[in-house]
Amino acid sequence: MGFFDSEIVQQEAKQLFEDYQSLIKLGQNYGKFDREGKKIFIEQMEALMERYRIFMKRFELSEDFMAQMTAQQLQTQLGQFGITPQQMFDQMNLTLQRMKAEVDKQP
């Protein structure tokens, strides 16, 4: 069975996409959130990024041709911006840490 034939993989990919879309939509109002709302949003983004990182690692570790191609496509696309997948995750982490620091400064 191929990597993408797995119902578990399909469900996780669908759930990641839906959760990401929801958080991005919610994040449009981030500036209007109170301190606790901002903390919750940041925690949810951190959890989503961790899930995404794990999902991408599965691609890399899979021996399935399509999974390997997907991982390679991501590397190529990010490479066009001069970054690696790890750098992308590191940058997202840094951004979330900065957001946390800003929230902690709020009264």
Image: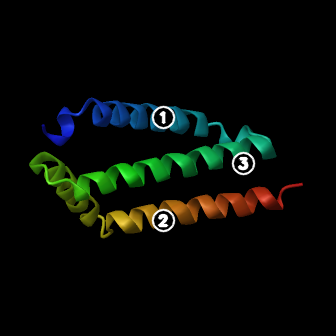
Residue with the mark numbered 1: 19
Place of residue 95 in the rendered image (x, y in percent of width and height, measured from the top left)? 57, 61
How far is mark 1 from mark 2, CA to CA? 20 Å
Q: Residue at x 52, y 38 (%)?
A: 24
The amino acid type, in three-letter code, at marker 3 is Lys
Q: Is residue 63 above or below residue 22?
A: below
Q: Judge by depth and name the residue closer to the eye, 50 or 38.
A: 50
How far is mark 3 from mark 2, CA to CA? 19 Å
Q: Judge by depth and name the residue closer to the eye, 106 or 50.
A: 50
Quadrant of the frame with the N terminus: top left
Q: Residue at x 41, y 32 (%)?
A: 15
Specify few, some or many for label 3: CA neighbours under 10 Å numbering under 14, 14-19, or 20 or more: some
Q: Counting residues from the N terminus, which is met first, the one under dot 3 or under dot 1?
A: 1
Res. 91 mark = 2
Q: Nearer the viewer, mark 1 or mark 2?
A: 1
**Helix or strand or loop: what does disc 3 sit on?**
helix
Q: Judge by depth and name the residue closer to the eye, 7 or 13.
A: 7
Residue with the mark numbered 3: 39
Res. 107 mark = none
Using the rendered view, name the quadrant where residue 84 is placed.
Answer: bottom left
Quadrant of the frame with the C terminus: bottom right
Q: Is residue 93 above or below residue 37?
A: below
Specify few, some or many for label 2: CA neighbours under 10 Å numbering under 14, 14-19, or 20 or more: few
